[in-house]
Image: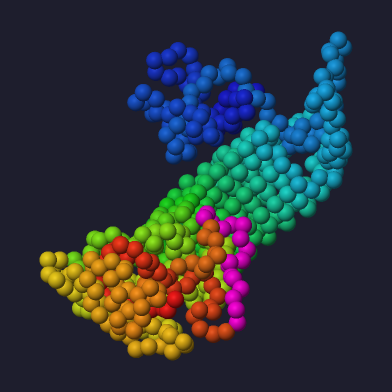
Amino acid sequence: MTDATIGQRRSYDGALCTVRYIGEVAGTTGSWLGVEWDDPSRGKHDGQHKGVRYFTCKSQALTSASFVRPTRPVDPPRTFLSALQYKYAPPEEQQKPGQAAPRPIVFSGKVAEEVGFEKIRRQQAQLGELLYVILDSTKVATAYSDDEKAKGQQIGEVCPKIRELDLSRNLLEHFDPVVDICAELLLLRSLKVNWNRFRNVLEDKKLETAGDAFEGVKELALEDTLLTWHEICHIAARFPTLSTLHAGSNQLSSLSPLPPSAPFTSNLVTLDLEFNHFTSLSDLAPLSSLTSLKSLILKKNKITTLTTPTAPLPAFSPTLNYVDLSYNLISTWSTVDSLPSSFPGLTSLRFTHNPLYDNPDLDTPGSLPPHPQQTATTSTSTSAASTLGKTEEAYMLLVARLPPTLKTLNFSTITTADRSDAEMFYLSRITKQLSSVPETEEHLILEKHPKWKYLCDSYGEPTITRRQEVNPNFLEARLIDVKFWAVFDGEETAAKSVRVPRAFDIYAVKGIVGRLFGLRAWEVRLVWETGEWDPVGGFEVEGGDGEESDDGGEEETKEGGGEENRKGRWVKREVELKDGPRQFGYCVDGTEVTVRVEKR
C-alpha cells in the first residue's frame, strides 16, 4: 500500500481505521501512525497519550484511538468490481499438485453431501442478474483500478440490474467513488454507505457535479459516518428523488437549517435519527419544514423534554403520523400531554423503555405534589397494582392522555374498547389523587391532568370523598366507614352504612352483615369494590414492546350493554373477603370502603 496520509482509510486484519496522525511519540523511537478505529472499543485512548494531545478523533468515545507502526502489514484495498467478484463469483479452488484432497464430512458413519450449494454458487456467479448486492466489509476503496480502466471494464455492463447496494464498512475516503459506481447503476433504488469515514464532503467536486448519478435512488443510509448534519444534507441534496434517509449513530445533538433548494425537503417521507444525542425536540426544529415527512425515528437518543426554556415548542408537519421515541429519557407526563401540539398528525407512537413507561405511577412526587395527609401505610391495593405490570399501566395512561386520533401504540392497535377502558382507568386515578388533598389544593392536581373535563363529560364526574387527618391514637382512626349494599333475587337493597373496627376479623364482619340484611353468617359472601381496574380475565399481559403483535388484543364478549359486557383489556377490580381470622383493616384499603353483599 502507498505511504500513509492523514485521513487515509486502512484495514488491519479486517479492523478498519482512519489515519489521524503521522509522527513521533514522546518516550519512543521511530515514527508512528495515530489511527482512529471504526470500532471505538478497540483502541486505548482518544488521541491523547500520557498527557500529550497528538490528534483529535471524530468519535466521542474515550478508547477509539491507538498508535501503530507504519510497517505493520495492511489489508490490500479492492475496487468495486474486484469486491463483487470476490463476494459473488470467487474463482474455483484449484487443487495444487501433491495437495491432499479435502476430507469428506462424516456424520454417524455417513458421508455428508452438499446439496444445493453448487446451484447457489452458479446463481451468484451470474453477476449480470444480481438485484441485491451486499459488499460490506470487503475493503472497497475505489470504483475502478487503472488496469480495469485499461481493459474497458464497465460496472454498468457487469451488473446492470442492481437495485439495492450496500457498501457499508469499507475503505471509502471520499464520495467520488460512490458517484462513479452509482452513475452506472441505472436501476439502483437503495444505497447504504454506513460506517465509512468520508472527508472533505463539502469540497468534493465530483459530488457537487454528480448530475443524475443518483437519479433513481429513493433510500440512502449514512449511519455511523460521523458526518455533521450539514454534510449529511449536502450529500442528500444530490439525490433528487430521495424519500428515506437513515442518519443514525452520528453523534448529532442539534440540527442546522435545511438547504431550502434541496429536493429532499419536499420528498422525504421517512427520517431515521436513532442513536444520536438529541435532548429535546427543539433540537430537531428545522425538520418542521419537511412537508412530506410521515415517519420520524428518534429511538435511543437522550430526549427528556419537548423544548428548552429558551426555545419555542416545535410543530411538525401534519403529514407526520409515526414517531418512535422509545429508549429515551422522558420522565414527566407533561411531556406526553404536549406531544399532540408538536405532532398534530400523530396516529402511531412507540414509547417503550422511557423512565416514565417503566414507572408510570401518578402517585410519585415527580408526577403529583406530595401532601402531609398522604399516608405511608402499605396497602393491599398498592401490592395488587404492582402485579398488574407497570408497562400495561403505562400503556393505559398513554392511551388515555393522548387524543383519539392515536390509532397505534407500541405496534398494538388501539380499539374503541381499549380507549374507553383506559380513559375510565385514568379518571379513577385522578379521582384517587383528588381525594388525597384538601379542596383548596384541587387545582394543583387538575393542572397536571388537562383531560379532566373531557373525561368527566364522557363518563360523568366522579364523587370525590376526601379523607380527614385523624390522630392515630383516637378511636376514629381505628374504625372504617363501610357502605354495604346487596342484590337479592335481582332487586337491589338499600345501602346500609356502619362503622366497623379495623381489628374485627372477617367472621365478625359477616356477623354484622347477617344482622343488617337478615341472613345467616355462613350464607354471606362479601366483595370489596376497590374502584380500581385490572386486566380482563384471560388476557395475557405481555412484556417487551409487542413488536410482533399487529392487533390490539381485543377480546370477544357476549352481546349486550352494561359495563360487565364491555370488551377490552380492563375491568373493575373486585376482591372477595374470604373467611378467616385476618383483620378487616388489613383486607381493605382506606377509611371509607364499599362492600357488595351476595347470598351464597
Q: Quadrant of the N terminus?
A: top right
Q: Nearer the viewer, residue 482 or 136?
A: 482
* Residue 446 can be seen, yes or no: no
x 25%, y 68%: residue: 504
Residue 335: quarter of image: bottom left
Q: How is the image coloured?
A: rainbow
Residue 104 percent location from the top left of the image: 83, 22
Residue 535 percent location from the top left of the image: 49, 67
Q: Nearer the viewer, residue 404 or 506?
A: 506
Residues drawn in magenta: 543-559
On screen, residue 363 above or below 453: above
The verdict on residue 436 being magenta is: no
Q: Nearer the viewer, residue 446 or 432?
A: 432
Q: Nearer the viewer, residue 250 or 154?
A: 250
x 46%, y 35%: residue: 57
Q: Tell me the chief SS of the magenta region.
A: loop
On screen, residue 1 above or below 17: above
On screen, residue 335 above or below 32: below
The verdict on residue 551 being magenta is: yes
Q: Is residue 391 left or right of residue 499?
A: right
